[in-house]
Amino acid sequence: MNQDAGILKDNALRSTLNEIMPKALTRREFLKIAAGATAATGLAPAVRSIVIEPFVHPPEEELPGQATWYASTCRQCPAGCGIIVRTIEGRAKKIEGNPLHPLNRGKLCARGQAGLQVLYNPDRLKNAVRQSGGRGSRQFEPLYWPDALDLLRDKIAALSGAERLAFLGGLMPSHAYRLTARLLEALGAAPPVIYDLQSALEGRSAASQLSLAFFGAPDLPEYDLSQSDVVLSFGANLLETWMSPVAQSAAYGAMRQGRMGRRGLLVQFEPRLSATAASSDEWIPVKPGAEGFVALAIGRIIVEERLGHVGSHRSQAVLYQNVDVRDMSTASDVPVETLRRMARAFADADRAVAIPGGYLAGQRNGFSSMLAVQALNLVVAQVGRQGGVFLSNPGPTAALRQNPPVNSFDEVMDLIRRMKAGEIDLLLVHSANPIYELPAAAGFAEAITRVPFVVSFSPFVDETAIWADLILPDHTYLESWGYQVPSPGADRPVVSSQQPVVRPLYDTLAAADVLLGLAARLGGKPADALAWQDEASYLEETVGELYGSSLGAYDARTPSGFWALWHQYGGWWSEKQIRREPELTDVVQKPLAISDPQFEGDPQDYPFHLYPYSSITLTDGRGANLPWLQEAPDPMTTVQWGMWVEINPTTASALGISDNDVVQVESPHGSLEAPVVIYPGIRPDVVAIPVGQGHQDYGRFAQEVSGSNPLTLVAPVTDPGTGALAWGATRVRLKPTGRKQFLARLESLDGKGRESLD
Ligand code: SF4
């Protein structure tokens, strides 16, 4: 610890930091010197050279055989957990959770651990390339970075109008998003469209719209699990991939065991037994699309029976005046007695919270169902109360509030329409793989062929990059600078920092430096809007606005001292808990109503509901190129290196299907074949398929696993309330193929082990 940098307010934090991160300041200075040396080559800010030299003159903080730890941010999913990375002699060896970080407090999930295999993946692009044989040819020729930037500048300069430029982003670093948005604005182009499958499965854009309607602010809600006594989760896989699963898992542990004499109750309403449902006290298999009906019935019972501690419920009676509990019971397949029992448990608890999850948002009645669930928190007066619902803190400065939003599926469809109509001449894609991540029926694969020039920033040749003219590979997140304002966040304002833990392995270039170099080449307004020398100087200035804040967990004596502590800590956050209490709008002053769920496909022809769910290991498929994650067994089926279709034993018996039988799953939009896992934890009218496999590109580990992408089946329909993809609103039918494919499983569900898989 460089004590000149500042004063740590907390002795415990200081000793932990001394133990784990003693040398970040000197290293940072080293990196700055390295960047300065590059500038002398005349290529800055667009290019930083890679120093090719033996380890004879190691960086000053490196001692042979001794570990150096660097704090940064995990980018394997949108949550933004703090990490510390152990490096030895310039190589990253191990990733752990940052014990100081208020979001995940030292914890990490398997996907976070596997980040090393992103960095050292053998299928990374090693330099900028262009497809010499044309798009889709897979024939690449290397390109010098200055030539690549000149080419991109020429393409932008040749556009007949700025509206012919489009940018599609996914899980982008916040600073790269802000620089992109500034560049597009300076050019007069439309703002970036941000969309990724994981966020769609979580229902992020719908949750943001729900917050806006309910609380008057678009920031995502935070549910105070750790202090709650009763949690009703409506399709939120809290302990797997939804929103901030590591923080939620820690909070769940605190709810169950962290309080003397108080053990919280978790009830999970969803059609399939997820790993979260398996950890709950009670799993209630609701009819798909009927979760909101359950919430309405519970609310009606609370109001009718004047349950709980909040008086007469006179003001809420209007919400449920049209609700008939028996009708709701029939519509949802949840017995009236169960609904009454849930209502009493929820209302009688001192602290209770209801959570509208991703599966709810993925229905065509999603918004009204989410509204009904959120209204339960109002009925038991848990809005802004301990154990209830709060709002995420926004970024602490104006610049740090400009983070990537999540656009709706309707907005993506509008982009696809413009591409198909020939209205887009130049498409830039960063951190998104829409050909894999969007429903095939959305038509992105066809639309991209109508765009004359496409540029991808992917570090890997994925399904979309293969249709790009140029691939300008960004650094991986362990080689990159950056920051993230986690949303949902912690119990206080947090900005998580990102820094390179190793030098970039290859001749890749930070997308932020590409944007800055491009703006400098374009001159005029773009150059004025992006007038930073390089990425690091942009970040130093932006993050430097936090210097001097009285809220911070550490005091710095100088701006450079603040910059050092920012990296040593792994970001900036408030020393004290600051909960943001939501304000209520008048959205819940009228009777609540939810339309019947609608599904694509005639029930006579397509008798089953398709449930494509986010894989706990591969998430939305971005982890499929990492062998550690392919090897990790799925917690419910123990399958490794594969994909499968989950079918209820009753359904399987009616169709004459056994474990490992290959079935054809067909929807009105496509079909796939996959082996069956007979799964007792699923409704008989539902078939579930994990998302993540079925890659055509994206490297050897993703491509060599047999499997299909369930997005080929999904109808491109939306919830009219939010414009979000109704990914749970497709019906399918099943047909045995007569073939078998034995899945690699640690054990079968009958508990007999591998031997039972005859
Ligand atoms: S929850 Fe997401 S951000 Fe956190 S460790 Fe896991 S993959 Fe990384």
Image (cartoon, helix red, strand yellow):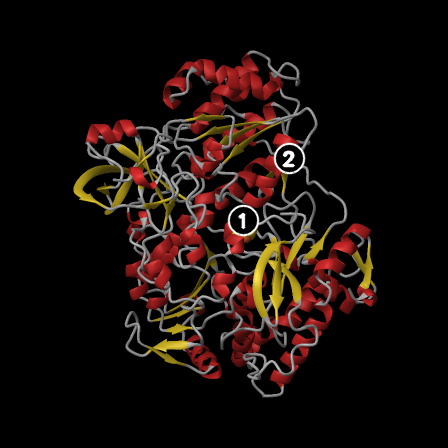
Residue at position x 54%, y 57% in the image: 75
Residue that carries the numbered disc 1 in the rendered image: 109
- The image quarter in which residue 662 lies: top left
- In this image, 234 relative to 388: left or right? left
The kind of residue tagged 2 is: Ala
Q: Please tell me which residue lies in front, 683 or 347.
A: 683
Q: Please tell me which residue lies in front, 600 or 317.
A: 600
Determine whether the residue tagged by mark 2 lies in a helix, strand or loop: helix
Residue 88 is situated, as x and y percent measured from the top left of the image, at: 61, 68
Q: Relative to 115, say whether 616 is above or below.
A: above
Q: Is mark 2 within 8 Å of ligand 1?
A: no
Residue at position x 50%, y 43% in the image: 242
Residue 161 is situated, as x and y percent measured from the top left of the image, at: 42, 70
Q: Is mark 1 within 8 Å of ligand 1?
A: yes
Give whichever of discs 2 and 1 has the lower sequence position.
1
Quadrant location of the N terminus in the rendered image: bottom right
The kind of residue tagged 1 is: Cys
- The image quarter in which residue 725 lies: top left
Q: Relative to 148, say whether 671 is above or below.
A: above
State if disc 1 and disc 2 touch (CB < 8 Å): no
- In this image, 565 relative to 227: left or right? right
Q: Please tell me which residue lies in front, 95 or 475.
A: 95
Extreme-left residue of the structure:
738
Does the rendering let one see residue 314? yes
Q: Which mark is residue 254?
A: 2
Residue at position x 66%, y 63% in the image: 69
Extreme-bottom residue of the structure:
41
- In this image, 119 relative to 102: left or right? left
Residue 539 is situated, as x and y percent measured from the top left of the image, at: 65, 67
